[in-house]
Image (spheres, grey):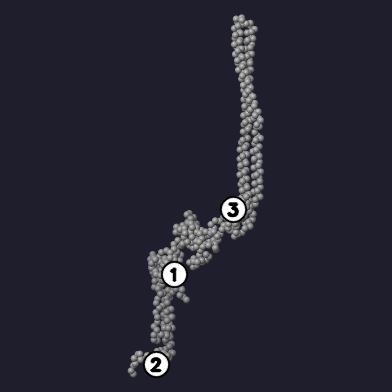
Amino acid sequence: MKQLPLQKQKEQQQINPKPRSQLVKKRIPILSRQQWIYVSLGLATCVLVILALRPTPILVDTGLVERGTLQTTVNAEGKTRIKEDFVISAPVNGRLDRIKLDEGDLIKKGSIVARIDPLPLNSAVNEALGKLAEAKSRRQGVATLRPKSEQLAQARSRISAARANQLQTEARVTQAKAALEQARHDTKRAKELAAQGVIPSQTRERAELDLVTREKNLESATLAARAATKELEVAQAALKVLQKEQRDPDYLLKVYDSQVASIEAQLAKLQDDASRTNIRSPIEGEVLRILQKSSSFVSEGTPIVKVGDPKDLELVIDVLSQDALKIKPGNTILIEQGNSDIKDSPTNSLKAKVRLVEPSAFTKVSALGVEEQRVNVIGDFIDPPTNFGDAYRVDVQIVVWESNNILKVPLSSRFRCDRKWCVFVVRKSQIIKCPDVGFAQNICKNARRFISWVSFKDAKVERRFVEIGNRSNYEVEVRQGLSEGEVVILHPNEKIEAGIAVKSHKNDS
């Protein structure tokens, strides 16, 4: 029979199509039941051999090489602190009345927060006033101790009289001396005349008697002059005594003046203390803590109430001194809220900024008993700290470096190899498709998915050297060795080597 061309055969088949069942019968050979059993056993044996020889892939966690923002931070613990809190203390000694305020109560500037019983202080003020009046009265009584002005005038008059009497006696002495000198001349002349017989002896004797009389008068006048001088000296001494008595009470004035000054100073302090028995708030804010609630005797300086404005908060973060060298004023501070991590929920974190890095460090013993030099970093909130109060503990991250469009990988993917940094890169195998022709068509359609899972789903591992740069808590900058979009293995262990098959936990489902 002459064979028709291929195009004519197709046209003839289209004109006289054969049933599909006849075509299937021609393409699939007819096997007996025993042959089908043999074929099934052979296929099952092949599958078991493949499963036995197939290496078990290692389950790994994977991460992606991508571009994005990278931040280098200093992680630390800190606490919130009210910028200006006030511990109100007892200004004076006394009995404190029971405080009626509670923690969290709002207070205004100048409002009374505590009260000390003023009765003892008022009594002390009255007592000081009495002492002051007594001291002033004694000072005024000093004038009664001085000599009267009449006594001084009388003493001065006595001196004047004594001086006049002295002058009078001195004149008498002068007069007696002149009379004596004249009597001596008269006696001498009378003796000469009597010797010549010019005058009688009686006249000479009277002249001699007059001379003796004049001598006695001179002696009497001299004694009277001496007595007048002594009387003048006595009068002057009496005046000096009165003058000294006039000045003697001056020391009492100084004593009483010092007593008055001391009592006035004591009175001023007592009056000031009495005016401060009502203890008032210096600011407007809230009662943070009541340190002395019950009524009791308190001494000056005893803390009673702590007040402040809890809305005016700042951060106090202590960091290691070597980390403090990286921190500058103006650096951003990220604050965790609750149990959420900044990486997992960045929108749930608050922002602040560094205001001050204190210039002096202090020694702190860590939980392991190691002495560390730490520095306080003071920060101001940018976002309102609505959920925080005074002395709340916070976990913060201080951003010391930040850049955008950085090629980065998860930090846990890197490891040391040959004194360099390496990562394991996952290279996925190509899935081999089964042939879709002839007798194996139906079998491949049913077994393709199984064969792909058994042999070709696992990926291979490649070790690669990388050059890294800045790092954050979770990611690290890749400067050389990786490309964007590649997959790396996280947390590599000693079981992972180059060329082994791995399977990601993310593909288990």
Q: Amino acid at mark 1?
A: Leu
Which numbered marker is on residue 490?
1
- Left-right relation of 453 to 114: left
Mark 2 sits on what residue? 15
Residues shaded magenta: 12-18
At horizontal 62% and vertical 29% (from top left) the residue drawn is: 240
SS at mark 3 in the image: strand
Q: Amino acid at mark 3?
A: Ser
Compared to residue 147, the image places residue 181 above or below, namely above
Image quadrant in which you'd find residue 441: bottom left
Q: Is the residue marked by circle 3 packed among few (<14), some (14-19), or many (20+) residues within 10 Å? A: some
* Rendered-image quadrant of the N terminus: bottom left
Q: Nearer the viewer, mark 1 or mark 3?
A: 3
Q: Nearer the viewer, mark 3 or mark 2?
A: 2
SS at mark 1 in the image: strand
Mark 3 sits on what residue? 89
